[in-house]
């Protein structure tokens, strides 16, 4: 009896958690499969009556013809979305490449050589990065304005890089510390130099952590809004996130907008599904760094 | 033998940094050569801009009109007597308090449920994590849809249940901060839940079964056994969530744009508006130091707790 009651309670709570975590996303997904007149029906349609891919085609700049509705033109916001996807990918790839190279090189000596002031370096880097993003945007706005980096993908990439690098160093050091130091010593005895140890021992052993933090770096750069909005909105280098407030202010078709949101969610959700086990471990470790901007 | 004697030899030449290449570097030197420049660079791209921002806040700068003159503490004097700034500080504190309360309540509940053993637990955990994988701006866009006065989810549910007979606008000055707090809490509850889950999993199972045998009730079990174990994780998560809430910016820009009126202008939004919309960048810099004064104690306590010996 008691066992049964506990089971029922558990089912109720678990269903609530699933509902709470997913309903806003499902709601906007629902909108992305509708035409505009269905959107305004009252009471609302919880499931679209005739699910259509038109909003996705429109927002990706593909006109569509449907016998029932006639010609559906491409959305006027399609160029911003397509350009945004391209620029966001370029920024994310730049940030990923720079971060993985620099972070592995710095994390190796900080984790393995027992440097005299190693912890101090790390502490300063990490604390200095926990400044609100909006405070750091002000001086950078002036710098970038005079350096000509305002409205360029490099400008945003530099800002993202300055956040991802401490994060990834932190994650890698945490991971390298769990590997036995004897591996390095025996490789050195076998005649490898420091760079040899780095190449043949550290990189292969830290592989999972490196891959995961690359993925998280990509996710961060893809998701980052504030810097992208301040430094690229309205320019040719506009990334994907700033396209959304622009669409909102221009009162874009809500269905098209919903489709665009779902498109922008593909990378985070794919990453979440494939890397869940690593991310739950690593993301909490680096949570401070990656979100604080 | 060779290496040891070479390392001991004093470097005489003024161009010793060239001579260094002739002998093998010690691990210390090698590590410092790799690490120091990059660490210095990392500090440089943060500390220098902040110092520059402080300098800007003592001046009156408009980069588009090429105005630049020293005015001392005037920006700060102006900020402290500016009703917009006072309002934004109150909005930020209001928002933060509600986010923290909601996050504690939901996060603790989720962690306790996810700690139970049931089939499909792993999938449920992944799903719980999804709101955190989304970014803050996407949260804002999605919740705008949920709150919409024309096709919103909340209106739809209430209308279908016949609680309301026409769609309402919920984003009124009285309720906007509460609704923003709910949306932001949705985004950050997973962090709280996973921090606490980590703490819960460190509790040995025997203690519980022993307590049950002794006939300790569930509330007392929670207070005397569970809570002491997760106290540390709870404290860390609490400070972290507070920091996230007080520095939240995207939410305000995308979901409400500070409106209606000035009812949802948080301190961060005030800085954004002043610096980048009104283009009064030095006044914005001055206000940003007010934000820093609020956040620095939070961060210091965070690092003290993280680095303290347990």
Image (tube, helix red, strand yellow):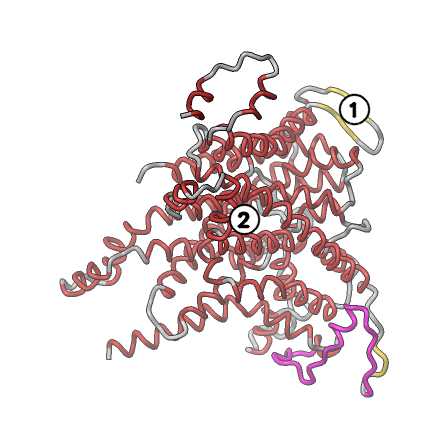
Q: Is the magenta stretch mostly helix, strand or loop?
A: loop
Query: Along the horizontal axis of the image, is A33 left or right of B233?
Result: right
Residue sitting at x 59%, y 51%: A217
Residue sitting at x 60%, y 30%: B47
Residue sitting at x 43%, y 28%: A116
Query: Along the horizontal axis of the image, is B221 left or right of A191?
Result: left
Residue B95 has which mark? 2
Q: Nearer the viewer, mark 1 or mark 2?
A: 1
- Residue A173, position as x, y percentages in the image: 46, 43
Residue A237 versus residue A39 in the image, above or below: above
Residue at mark 1 shares a chain with residue at mark 2: yes
**Is-magenta flag for residue A35?**
no
- Residue B248, position as x, y percentages in the image: 58, 47
Specify the farthest residue to the front.
B2
Q: Counting other residues with Cα less than 10 Å from the Cα at mark 2, is it few (<14), some (14-19), or many (20 or more)?
A: many
Residue B250 versus residue A117 in the image, above or below: below
**Is-magenta flag for residue A48?**
yes
The residue that mark 1 highlights is: B68
Q: Which image quadrant is residue A164 in?
A: top right
Magenta-colored span: A40-67
């Amino acid at each position: 009896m008691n066992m049964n009651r506990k089971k029922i309670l558990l089912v109720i709570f678990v269903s609530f958690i699933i509902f709470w975590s997913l309903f806003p996303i499902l709601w906007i997904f629902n909108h992305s499969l509708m035409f505009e007149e269905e959107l305004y029906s009252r009471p609302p349609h919880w499931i679209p009556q005739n699910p259509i891919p038109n909003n996705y085609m429109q927002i990706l700049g593909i006109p569509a013809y449907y016998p029932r509705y006639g010609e559906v033109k491409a959305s006027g916001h399609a160029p911003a979305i397509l350009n945004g996807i391209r620029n966001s990918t370029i920024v994310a790839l730049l940030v990923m490449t720079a971060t993985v190279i620099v972070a592995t090189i710095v994390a190796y000596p900080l984790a393995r050589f027992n440097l005299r002031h190693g912890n101090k370096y790390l502490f300063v880097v990490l604390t200095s990065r926990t400044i609100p993003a909006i405070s750091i945007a002000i001086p950078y706005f002036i710098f970038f304005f005079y350096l000509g980096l305002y409205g360029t993908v490099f400008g945003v990439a530099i800002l993202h890089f300055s956040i991802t690098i401490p994060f990834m160093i932190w994650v890698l050091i945490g991971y390298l510390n769990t590997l036995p130091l004897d591996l390095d010593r025996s490789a050195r005895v076998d005649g490898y130099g420091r760079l040899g140890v780095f190449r043949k021992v550290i990189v292969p052993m830290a592989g999972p952590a490196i891959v995961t933090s690359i993925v998280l770096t990509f996710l961060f750069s893809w998701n980052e809004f504030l810097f992208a909005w301040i430094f690229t909105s309205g320019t040719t280098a506009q990334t994907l996130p700033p396209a959304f407030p622009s669409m909102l202010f221009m009162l874009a078709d809500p269905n098209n907008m919903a489709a665009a949101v779902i498109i922008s969610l593909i990378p985070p959700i794919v990453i979440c599904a494939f890397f869940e086990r690593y991310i739950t471990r690593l993301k909490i470790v680096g949570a401070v760094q990656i979100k604080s901007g | 033998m060779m290496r040891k004697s070479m390392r001991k030899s004093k470097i005489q030449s003024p161009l010793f940094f060239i001579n260094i290449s002739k002998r093998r570097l010690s691990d210390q030197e090698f590590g410092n050569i790799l690490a120091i420049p990059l660490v210095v660079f990392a500090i440089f791209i943060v500390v220098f801009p902040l110092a520059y921002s402080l300098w800007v806040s003592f001046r009156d700068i408009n980069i588009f009109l090429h105005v630049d003159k020293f005015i001392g503490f005037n920006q700060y004097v102006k900020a402290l007597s500016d009703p917009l700034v006072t309002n934004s500080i109150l909005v930020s504190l209001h928002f933060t308090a509600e986010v923290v309360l909601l996050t504690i309540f939901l996060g603790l509940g989720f962690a306790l449920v996810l700690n139970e053993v049931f089939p499909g637990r792993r999938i449920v955990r992944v799903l719980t994590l999804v709101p955190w994988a989304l970014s803050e701006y996407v949260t804002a866009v999605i919740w705008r849809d949920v709150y919409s006065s024309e096709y919103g989810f909340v209106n739809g549910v209430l209308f279908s249940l016949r609680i309301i007979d026409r769609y309402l606008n919920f984003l009124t000055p009285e309720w906007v901060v509460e609704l923003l707090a709910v949306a932001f809490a949705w985004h950050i509850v997973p962090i709280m839940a996973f921090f606490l889950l980590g703490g819960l999993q460190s509790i040995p199972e025997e203690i519980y079964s022993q307590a049950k045998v002794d006939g300790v009730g569930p509330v007392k079990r929670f207070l005397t056994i569970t809570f002491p174990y997760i106290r540390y994780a709870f404290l860390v998560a609490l400070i972290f969530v507070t920091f996230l809430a007080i520095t939240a910016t995207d939410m305000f820009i995308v979901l409400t744009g500070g409106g209606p009126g000035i009812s949802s202008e948080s301190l961060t939004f005030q800085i954004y508006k002043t610096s980048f919309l009104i283009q009064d960048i030095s006044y914005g810099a001055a206000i940003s130091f007010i934000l820093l004064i609020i956040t620095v104690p939070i961060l210091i306590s965070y690092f003290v707790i993280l680095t303290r010996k347990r």
